[in-house]
Image (spheres, helix red, strand yellow):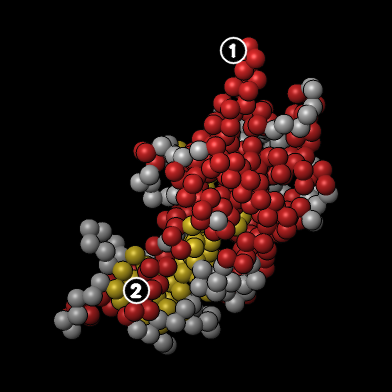
Amino acid sequence: MMITQDYLLHKLKELKLEFLSPITVVIPKPKAKFLQQAIPAVLLSGTLVVTIFARWINDRCSDSFYSLKRLLNHILRNRGWYQITQAYRTSMNRFLSPDTPVVIDMTDLAKPRARKMKYLALVRDGSEDKIVPGYWCLEVYAYLKKKRVIPLALDVFSIDDPTVASENLQIARTIQAVDKDIKHKGIWIADRGFDRLEVLKTLFSLNARFIIRQRGDRHVMVGDRVAISVYDLAERLYQQQVNRGNHRRIVFCPVRLPRRRESLFMVAHFREGYERPLLLLTNMKVFHSYQADQIVGHYRKRWSCEEAVEFLKSRVGFERFRIRRYEAIQHLAIIAMLAMGFLSWILLRNQIVTGLLFNLTSKFRKKVRFQYYRLLDGLQQLAKIEFTKQIHLILEPFLR
């Protein structure tokens, strides 16, 4: 057991340096040291509250006040964060392929008790389904095999921020930045909230492939006919298919947007137990049934985005930070992205370490489908074992 723990600590240190080395070369040494300390501390403490995760940092400072001040100064300063994000995405790009689903979504950072925070806006609290003060956060994840998820963006913003200008412009900026850093790889996948002409124009300008779920009220052109809503078109195609004796639940059709030349395809999946079909709009070629099945399969992977943000909020403390400055909140979101990115790095780079960490977890975690919970449990359990060992060494003379 002792050998296993020593091996794990050695390999985890190697993986951390390997993960951070492409990032630390583009930033000053003090900021690099901060990242090397902050990312493991956030994972082991399970929070983004500076006063709590600072307890896991041993910087040989005799006064905790100055230790906290140093950490806060790094979080508050704007210098270096753009380079950190860019270098991180460029490094993780090696794991992406041209067909990797790149999921974009938006979540709320609810602050129901906040009153005087900078650029505080109104958001819909998804957990309680009501409008409260807070901020919005654009999330982008790359979905890999075996439900491994790489976070590529956690952009916190407020529509009251003058530099944001509008929600559509912020979405465009995030898509353009991520697409540039991942070298135009992947298939962009989005839910109904991104069924906007401005988003489509952004993806058209990047020549990016995409699959966007439709609300159903968007009108499209079929050939040179009069525009028809996506919902009515799907119902008509499905009825024609049933009349021909074909009872497949997926229909598809080439379409285009009014006053646009780009070729698009509408795919509709009539699911059992649902009143309305799943409506998808894509610029990928769909001429056969198996291609339509692939489009629906790609979209279903979007649910991993929901699991990822739930993991970040429940186990990394993404929503429970205790800091007021708007810019600092944006920087803490980057730290949360790097923390989950490091877990993805462990999963992708060393299966032996992953298996050993899984073995340290509670038996109740062994059947969890989203394996990041189990991996983080293993890291935290290893930290507890090492902490207990250190306490025993300190108290050994007294216990004799």
Residue 271 is marked as none
Which corner quadrant holds the C terminus?
Answer: top right
The answer to whether residue 4 is left or right of residue 239 is right
Q: Residue furthest front?
A: 400
Q: What amino acid type should be assigned to the residue bearing mark 1? A: Leu
Viewer-proximal residue among 352 and 4 = 4
Q: Position of residue 24 (x, y in %)?
A: 76, 52
Q: Is residue 241 above or below residue 40?
A: below
How far apart, in angstroms, are the residues tagged by discs 2 and 1? Answer: 67 Å
Viewer-proximal residue among 138 and 372 = 372
Q: Which residue sits at x=23%, y=80%?
A: 241
Q: Quadrant of residue 91?
A: bottom right
Is label 2 in contact with label 1 (beta carbons under 8 Å)? no
Mark 2 or mark 1, which is nearer to you? Answer: 1
Q: Residue furthest bottom?
A: 224
Q: What amino acid type should be assigned to the residue bearing mark 2? A: Asp
| Element assignment for label 1 | helix
Q: Which residue sits at x=34%, y=79%?
A: 290
Q: Earlier in the sequence, mark 2 or mark 1?
A: 2
Q: Position of residue 114 (x, y in %)?
A: 60, 30
> How many circles with numbers are drawn on the protein?
2
Q: Which residue sits at x=22%, y=58%?
A: 273
Q: Position of residue 83 (x, y in %)?
A: 76, 56
Residue 341 visible within the image: yes
Viewer-proximal residue among 258 and 293 = 293
Residue 399 is marked as 1
Q: Quadrant of residue 69?
A: top right
Q: Position of residue 155 (x, y in %)?
A: 63, 51
Residue 293 is marked as 2
